[in-house]
Amino acid sequence: MLRSAQTYSKLSRTHSVRVKCDTTTSIAQADNVKIAFRGREIEVPRGSKLRTALLRAGLTPHSEGAVYINCRGIGSCGTCAVEIQGEVQPASWTTAEQLRLNIPPHSAPGNQRLRLACQVACAGDLRLTKYDKFWGEGDTPLPDLPPTAGAAGGAAGEGGAGGAGVTPLGELEFVLDREAQRPEQR
Ligand code: FES
């Protein structure tokens, strides 16, 4: 959807996920989608890898110690599993998802509702549910995060804890996502 520069500038100021925009920014880059996750809402560029989008906003698809112990997007650990309502690409399980989501503790039938956040791109507005347990293989949705002061989506760090709360490895968290590098690092 085409937005005016003024509108896009306003969006950039009012949402926690900020996207640098200059005269060469493409329409595709300016086309954002919304993600609702555990009581928060963030806005990210369409096409963003879901795991990256959450982490950049200070949220995480990982729970418990999986924030520290995960495969950083290889698709092998299975800890970024979430239920997704909305359009992502690819629309069905990738090969990595077929392999990992069929390995315990993920198993049928609960695995059928899950996607790996590191394997999908945000193609439309999304509503996510993260289930309990280390791999997100439980049946109880995690509760909403506490509200944060200021912008929707919260500060860096789950629950607005700040710092490297959800990205203990810093930019290495995104080393497997070629599109995730910040503009100044390209
Ligand atoms: S981060 Fe390991 S499978 Fe997604």
Image (tube, rainbow, N blue to C red):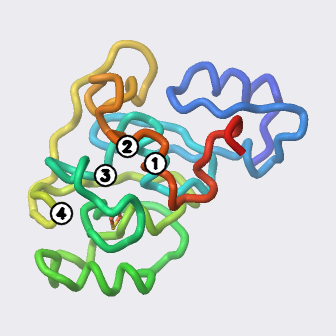
Assess mark 4: CB under 8 A from ligand 1? no
Q: Is residue 32 left or right of residue 137?
A: right
In three-dimensional space, the C-alpha distance between marks 4 and 1, rounded to whole angstroms, equals: 21 Å
Mark 4 vs mark 1: which is more N-terminal? 4
* Quarter of the figure that contains the C terminus: top right
Which residue is drawn at the image coordinates 83% and 47% (left, top)? 26
Q: Helix, strand, or loop for circle 2? A: loop
Q: In the image, is residue 161 above or below residue 114? A: above
What is the three-letter code of the residue carrying label 1?
Leu
* Residue position marked by numbered label 1 in the rendering: 172
Mark 3 touches mark 2? (CB < 8 Å) = no
Mark number for residue 30? none
Q: Helix, strand, or loop for circle 1? A: helix
Indicate the position of residue 95 as horizontal and vertical percent values: 42, 86
Q: Which picture quadrant has residue 7?
A: top right
Assess mark 3: CB under 8 A from ligand 1? yes
Mark 4 touches mark 2? (CB < 8 Å) = no
Q: In the image, is residue 83 above or below residue 151? A: below
Pointer 2 local density, CA inside 10 Å: few below 14, some 14–19, many at least 20: few
